[in-house]
């Protein structure tokens, strides 16, 4: 169990990056959704023990993470949003080196785990190639492999599908689905589809605060009967909230939240997690005006 209570973090001259975050996570896949600048990466770095908060507590399996960060690091796998690589070291050699830095023995068992992770992340054909020469998608897969070294109990992934093509993304979905059975996997992203595909439980963060929290199904069910879609302008008298406007096959499509139809050509449509995401952000923005 991972328990986060009243976590607060500020940077000089800027609004609060974390403004009293509370979360309780059990084993399984958990999605943290939010726009850029919402506080996701600050929260991930704090949970990984890479920076201290101004206030609050973090406990994992009964351990006070802020007081004893080394205990968590032995059980943690972390993929940051971006990372560098030594310029001339091949994929397999670098993973072996990182395994030793993580405290794993430099023996045949670790070597087999490295090879298994290279295969799992579809990098076998590139095992001797320098990671610095990898494409963006390949480097991201390497990052996932290093996060899995030591079979961690807590896996924190910050924007893990960045740079992945659709086939690689699908492969990663399958891998993460298998990994989440016996550990906590915290997936932080601004890509709603990643969370909708993978996570039963989700929180939406905006302005350093959790503005929505629950199971994916429960959040979606709250909007049933209130989401409308159409291509024309809405009735000026309609009490409706614009959720999203996008082009679909070259045609503009608008989705609104409203008790009644916001316009003549609008039809009621089933809500999805993206509607919940935009609705939570609109409500949060309205509350701060």
Image (cartoon, rainbow, N blue to C red):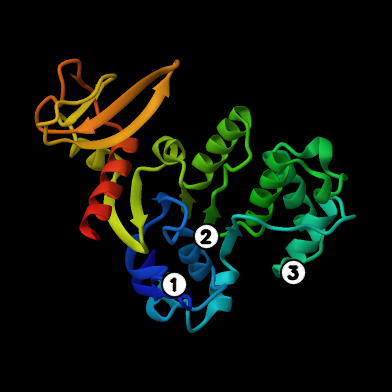
- The x and y percentages for residue 35 are 43, 50
Which residue is the site of mark 3? Answer: 101
Element carrying mark 2: loop
Q: Is 270 left or right of 209, judged from the image as shown? A: left
Please give the name of the residue rendered at 76% of the width and 39% of the height, measured from the top-left corner: 123
Task: Give the quarter of the figure containing the N terminus.
Answer: bottom left
Measure the alpha-carbon separation of dots 1 and 2.
34 Å
Residue closest to the eye, 97 or 48: 48
Which residue is the site of mark 2? Answer: 153
Q: Earlier in the sequence, mark 3 or mark 2?
A: 3
Please give the name of the residue rendered at 63% of the width and 56% of the height, measured from the top-left corner: 147
Mark closer to the observer (1, 2): 1
Element carrying mark 1: loop
Q: Is 146 drawn above or below residue 137 in the view shown?
A: below
As drawn, the residue found furthest toward the bottom would be 67
Please give the name of the residue rendered at 54% of the width and 54% of the height, measured from the top-left corner: 158
Q: Earlier in the sequence, mark 1 or mark 2?
A: 1
Q: Is 74 left or right of 191, judged from the image as shown? A: right
Instruction: Indicate the quadrant where residue 238 lies.
Output: top left
Q: Assess disc 3: are there few (<14), some (14-19) or many (≥20) residues with their C-alpha within 10 Å of its C-alpha.
A: few
Is residue 106 among the parts visible in the rendering? yes
Q: Is 183 drawn above or below residue 135 in the view shown?
A: below
Mark closer to the observer (3, 2): 3
Query: What's the mark number on residue 14?
Result: 1
Element carrying mark 3: helix
Q: Is 217 drawn above or below residue 255 in the view shown?
A: below
- The x and y percentages for residue 137 are 68, 40
Residue closest to the eye, 120 or 219: 219
- The x and y percentages for residue 206 are 35, 57
Task: Give the quarter of the figure containing the C terminus.
Answer: bottom left
Q: Assess disc 1: are there few (<14), some (14-19) or many (≥20) residues with their C-alpha within 10 Å of its C-alpha.
A: few
């Amino acid at each position: 169990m991972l328990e986060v209570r009243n976590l607060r973090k500020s940077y000089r001259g800027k609004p609060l990056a974390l403004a009293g975050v509370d979360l309780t996570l059990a084993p399984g896949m958990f999605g943290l959704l939010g726009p850029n600048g919402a506080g996701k990466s600050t929260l991930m770095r704090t949970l990984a023990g890479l920076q201290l908060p101004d206030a609050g507590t973090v406990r994992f399996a009964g351990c006070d993470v802020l007081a004893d960060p080394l205990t968590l690091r032995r059980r943690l796998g972390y993929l940051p949003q971006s990372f560098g690589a030594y310029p001339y070291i091949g994929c397999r050699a670098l993973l072996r080196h990182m395994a030793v830095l993580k405290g794993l023995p430099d023996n045949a068992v670790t070597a087999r785990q490295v090879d298994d992770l290279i295969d799992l992340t579809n990098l076998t054909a590139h095992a001797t190639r320098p990671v610095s020469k990898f494409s963006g998608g390949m480097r991201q897969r390497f990052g996932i492999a290093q996060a899995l070294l030591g079979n961690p109990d807590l896996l924190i992934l910050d924007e893990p599908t960045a740079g992945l093509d659709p086939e690689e993304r699908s492969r990663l979905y399958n891998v993460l689905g298998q990994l989440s059975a016996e550990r906590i996997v915290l997936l932080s992203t601004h890509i709603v589809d990643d969370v909708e595909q993978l996570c039963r439980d989700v929180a939406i963060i905006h302005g350093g605060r959790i503005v929505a929290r629950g199971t994916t199904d429960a959040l979606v069910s709250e909007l049933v009967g209130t989401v409308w879609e159409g291509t024309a302008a809405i009735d000026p008298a309609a009490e409706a909230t614009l959720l999203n406007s996008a082009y679909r096959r070259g045609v503009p499509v608008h989705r609104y939240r409203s008790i009644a139809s916001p316009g003549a050509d609008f039809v009621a449509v089933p809500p999805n997690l993206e509607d919940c995401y935009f609705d939570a952000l609109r409500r949060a923005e309205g509350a701060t005006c």
